[in-house]
Amino acid sequence: MIFLITEIYQKINLNSLINLCVDLIKVQCYEKKLNLNIELPSETIIVIGDKIRFYNRYQYALL
C-alpha cells in the first residue's frame, strides 16, 4: 500500500492570513459583545509553508 502525502509549500502573507481569520470571527465577537482589536506591523510578513495549515492554526487559536 502506498500513501501519497502532498503538502503545498508557498509564500504566505501572514498579515493577510491573520486579518482573514479575524474577519471570520468578528461576528461571533459582536454577538457576545466582545471587542476584538489587532495590531499588525506595517511591513508585510512573509512565511513559507502550507497555507491551509497556517489558516487552520490561526483560526483555531482565535476561537
Image (cartoon, rainbow, N blue to C red):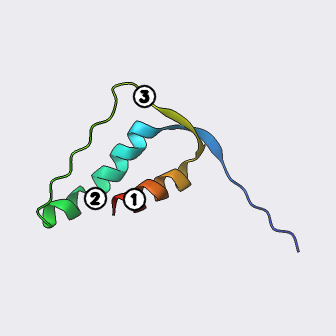
- In this view, the residue in front, 39 or 56, is 39
Q: Amino acid at mark 3?
A: Thr
Dot 3: few (<14), some (14–19), or many (≥20) neighbours within 10 Å? few
Mark 1 or 3, nearer chain start = 3
Q: Is residue 51 left or right of residue 14?
A: right
Nearer the observer: mark 2 or 1; the answer is 1
**In x, y percent, where is residue 35?**
15, 53
Q: Quadrant of residue 16?
A: top left
Q: Residue furthest bottom?
A: 1
Q: Amino acid at mark 1?
A: Ala
Distance between mark 3 and mark 2 Cα atoms: 22 Å
User: Residue 44's mark?
Assistant: 3
Question: At x 46% / y 31%, what residue is drawn?
Answer: 45
Mark 2 or 1, nearer chain start = 2
**In x, y percent, where is residue 48?**
60, 39
Dot 1 falls on a residue whose secondary structure is: helix
Where does label 1 land, which residue?
61
Distance between mark 1 and mark 3 Cα atoms: 21 Å
Question: At x 28% / y 51%, what residue is drawn?
Answer: 23
Placement of 46 over or under 2, stated as above or below: above
User: Residue 25's mark?
Assistant: 2
**In x, y percent, where is residue 38?**
26, 43
Q: Quadrant of the N terminus?
A: bottom right
Q: Residue furthest top?
A: 43
Dot 2 falls on a residue whose secondary structure is: helix
**In x, y percent, where is residue 5?**
74, 61
